[in-house]
Image: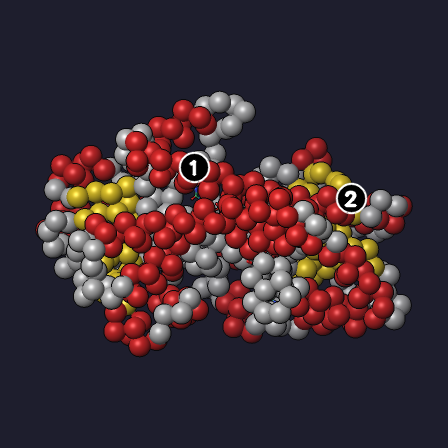
Amino acid sequence: MKSPTKICCIGAGYVGGPTMAMIASKCPDIRVDVVDLNAERIAGWNSEELPVYEPGLYEIVSEARGKNLFFSTDVEEHIVDADIIFVAVGTPTKTYGMGAGRAADLCYIEGAARMIAKVAKGPKIIVEKSTIPVRTAEAMRTILSANSGDGEFQVLSNPEFLAEGTAISDLQNPDRILIGGERNPKGDAAVEALVSVYNQWIPRERILTTNLWSSELSKLVANAFLAQRISSINSISALCEATGADIDEVARAIGTDSRIGPKFLKASVGFGGSCFQKDILNLVYLCEHFGLPEVSAYWESVVKMNDWQKERFSTKIVKTLFNTVRGKRIAIWGFAFKKDTNDTRESASIYICRDLLMEGANIAVYDPQVPESLMHADLRYVGVPQETIDQQFTVCNSCEEAADQSHGVAVLTEWDEFKEADFSKVYENMFKPAFLFDGRDILDHDGLRDQGFDVYAIGKG
Ligand code: NAD
Ligand code: UDX
């Protein structure tokens, strides 16, 4: 198989955009076309205001854009002569029909496969970049071969492990690249063609090759293990509060055991993001499908614990504010699901704001990256009426402005700038007692207590 010279990626989202920008910047001899049906998104990628906020992303996009990196809505045109076609479309949780609330909705994957089959000419390597249930490659292969004329397709699985907020360093220096392919000479050749792309900046020993099903399953399992650590530490945060232990001290004490390790042990108001919940629910559904109810229940408890942690935090605020927040202003610091991203999907902030709005609170929110229109859409999606949003939800330009005339401040995203807020001004302009709820354990709690704040922090007894 000849070395690839043209790559096309279907889907210009949080994965397609940054991943392809990295390939283009590391492989100057390969032309990379990123295509999407969403014209607004493509216009964003072609502008100075990229649709994805990610430290370092603008630099690599602007370096390669117009040279060997192109963003376009001409999806079919760029599929035709690409050697490798990445599929990086969304695979959200199904909201309808069989498996609703758990199974992955594969309609975009199928749409992409049918489009490839319709227009592709000559042999193609199709790469599943999206996170999908095990054996999706089989379905793609069937659709491709049943609908194509002369095309010869090899389907590979190449899941993406980047985390938002650190996507560029994750792509630059990944722990590993995983490529799954069919175990026969044609499959091996396709795997080697994709290896040759990554090997332009990643050492060969960090590129793992497996069979298709191991690769597909490993992505779901990696996310399930990561989320499980957060639910585990969050469950212990409740016990710390009950016993007087300190969750950060416990995390440090257990994390120094090299078998446990220190990462992903930061207690929080609950994990968010587009991946963890969706992928665990997908795993839960798969286990049920394969007749493994005990395994399914085991993994479902990770999501249940996360839901409980979010509810626990809202309840704590209401109880602390003398069992009523009706008509009270509460400042929310942070709406993104983690720092250094403008993504809000499944952010804990959405659920805490919903609970407090439904209790009658007036919410004043500040986030350095999330636009107001997205916050409104997120709240409507979880059932808050637009009228309530219009009357009780205000977006502010700074932490201090949000806290002005408030009864409580809740830190829900760990943005670094929150640590630098003008706390004497915040304190001065709040109603007393001035309650502060640290859902990320990023502030200096003793110092704030000395200033007069009444502080509640996750997992601090
Ligand atoms: P996203 O919703 O940001 O982007 C998907 C894009 O695909 C959208 O812009 C949509 O318009 C486009 N699209 C859908 N059907 C199309 C078609 N037929 N032709 C052209 N474009 C089409 O999603 P994302 O966050 O980039 O995630 C994509 C996949 O990667 C998902 O399976 C996700 O689970 C996985 N993943 C995401 C992350 C992450 O951090 N966001 C990390 C690893 C893996
Ligand atoms: C995750 C996986 O890390 C990544 O490998 C995969 O490709 C996509 O899903 P992402 O969701 O972007 O990445 O961010 P991540 O850093 O994993 O954080 C997810 C959520 O967990 C965030 O809400 C974060 O604040 C929370 N978190 C993370 C904690 O509460 N505590 C921790 O110790 C780590």
Q: Is mark 1 within 8 Å of ligand 2?
A: yes
The residue at the point 24 percent across, 37 percent down is 444
Looking at the picture, which amino acid does disc 1 mark? Ile
Left or right: 153 as drawn, with respect to 95: right
Camera-nearest residue between 305 and 42? 305
Camera-nearest residue between 437 and 399? 437
**Mark 1 → mark 2, Cα distance in angstroms:** 33 Å
Mark closest to the chain's N terminus, 1 or 2: 2
Camera-nearest residue between 204 and 69? 204
- The image quarter containing residue 367 is bottom left
Which residue is denoted by mark 1 in the rendering? 233
Camera-side mark, 1 or 2: 1
Looking at the picture, which amino acid does disc 2 mark? Asn
Residue 236 position, x and y percent, is 40, 36
SS for dot 1? helix
Instruction: Name the outermost residue toward the bottom.
Output: 387
Residue 25 position, x and y percent, is 61, 50
Label 2: how many Cα within 10 Å (few below 14, some 14–19, many 20+): some
Instruction: Name the outermost residue toward the top.
Output: 257
- The image quarter containing residue 152 is bottom right
Q: Which mark is residue 329?
A: none
Which residue is denoted by mark 2 in the rendering? 211
Label 1: how many Cα within 10 Å (few below 14, some 14–19, many 20+): many
Residue 250 position, x and y percent, is 38, 28
The residue at the point 35 percent across, 74 percent down is 385
Is mark 1 in CB contact (under 8 Å) with mark 2? no
SS for dot 2? strand
